[in-house]
Image (tube, grey):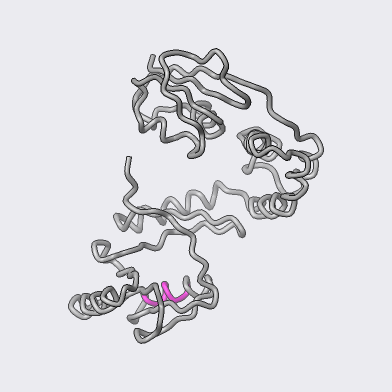
């Protein structure tokens, strides 16, 4: 499954971004850029990003053409076909940022999803992230192996875990670290009833997000395999492994 865009988080503090246009749309983009610390600039600026919020069609098209001819990446407000990049709806739990994009298909849908997530995600989420960052050295000292760290942190952050992001705050990190250790070898067998990844149960989706390696039969759809962690090892096989290896391994087949 291909991505229509690659989501990126760009640090703009102190860097120029061209903004063209007037009115509510331009003001909204200006406010967003100022929050990111960007320096709002005119068309003559030496910048790599530009936002064109010009209402009149021909004037907007001309501005976009001039900027693209210079190699500037352009966002054209309300004109997704002209855009090199789009601006997502944002849920801010500093330092956690959650961006929701639709590739320009529907800004309203992205806004509705943002509002839903705002009600679901606790305000303590940012504190948890900050505490984990501060404890990075201690975590490495306690769990020097990269795989051990990944498994321990993944298990703690899982639903119902000690560091469950929906429940835990910064104060949970020291207690977790005191008892953190290497995860044991585990093999889970998933027999999938549906080829649609949206039909995965919460348990199945959570396990795919934690697995160190996947053993999959050829009949398992790529769309389901893609729900696993990006760095999980994928192994094509005809049956469950005899020696699955350390950490969490999942064998998947269609029922």
Is residue 118 shown above or below 79? above
Q: Is residue 107 above or below residue 162?
A: below
Q: Front-most of 25 and 70?
A: 70
Where is residue 126, by image quadrant?
Answer: bottom right
Residue 119 left/right relative to 83: right
Residue at 32%, 39% in the rendered image? 1
What's drawn in magenta, residue-wise?
26-31
Q: Is residue 30 magenta?
A: yes
Q: Is most of the magenta stretch helix, strand or loop?
A: helix
Is residue 157 a member of the stretch shown in magenta? no
**Image quadrant where residue 248 sits:** top right
Q: How many marks?
A: 0
Please report the residue visible at 81 percent of the width from the left and 38 percent of the height from the top.
178
Left or right relative to 168: residue 192:
left
Q: Where is residue 120 drawn, in percent x and y?
A: 55, 46
**Quadrant location, the C terminus:** top left
The relative height of residue 107 versus residue 1 in the rendered view (above or below) is below
Residue 211 drawn at (x, y percent): 55, 30
> Farthest residue toward the left?
58
Quarter residue 20 falls in: bottom left
Q: Position of residue 242 (x, y in %)?
A: 55, 12
Residue at left offset 47%, top offset 53% = 115
Q: Nearer the viewer, residue 219 or 190?
A: 219
Residue 227 horizontal/vertical position (percent): 44, 35
The answer to whether residue 252 is above or below residue 123 is above
Residue drawn at x 39%, y 73% as measured from the top left: 48
């Amino acid at each position: 499954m291909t991505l229509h865009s690659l989501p990126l988080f760009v640090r703009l503090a102190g860097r120029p971004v061209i903004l063209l246009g007037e009115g509510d749309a331009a003001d909204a983009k200006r406010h967003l850029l100022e929050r990111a610390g960007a320096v709002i600039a005119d068309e003559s600026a030496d910048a790599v990003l530009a936002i064109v919020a010009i209402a009149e069609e021909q004037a907007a098209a001309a501005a976009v053409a001039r900027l693209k001819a210079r190699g500037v990446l352009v966002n054209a407000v309300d004109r997704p076909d002209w855009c090199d990049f789009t601006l997502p709806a944002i849920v801010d739990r500093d330092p956690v940022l959650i961006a929701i994009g639709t590739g320009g298909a529907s800004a309203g849908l992205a806004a509705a999803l943002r509002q839903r997530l705002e009600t679901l995600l606790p305000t303590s989420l940012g504190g948890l992230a900050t505490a984990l960052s501060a404890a990075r050295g201690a975590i490495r000292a306690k769990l020097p192996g990269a795989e051990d760290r990944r498994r321990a942190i993944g298990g703690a952050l899982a639903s119902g875990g000690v560091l469950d992001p929906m429940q835990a705050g910064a104060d949970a990190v020291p207690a977790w670290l005191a008892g953190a250790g290497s995860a044991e070898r585990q093999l889970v067998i998933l027999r999938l009833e549906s080829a649609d990844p949206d039909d995965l149960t919460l348990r199945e989706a959570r396990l795919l997000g934690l697995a160190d390696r996947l053993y999959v039969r050829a009949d398992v759809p790529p769309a389901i395999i893609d729900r696993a962690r990006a760095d999980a090892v994928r192994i094509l096989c005809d049956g469950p492994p005899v020696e699955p290896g350390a950490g969490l391994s999942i064998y998947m087949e269609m029922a």
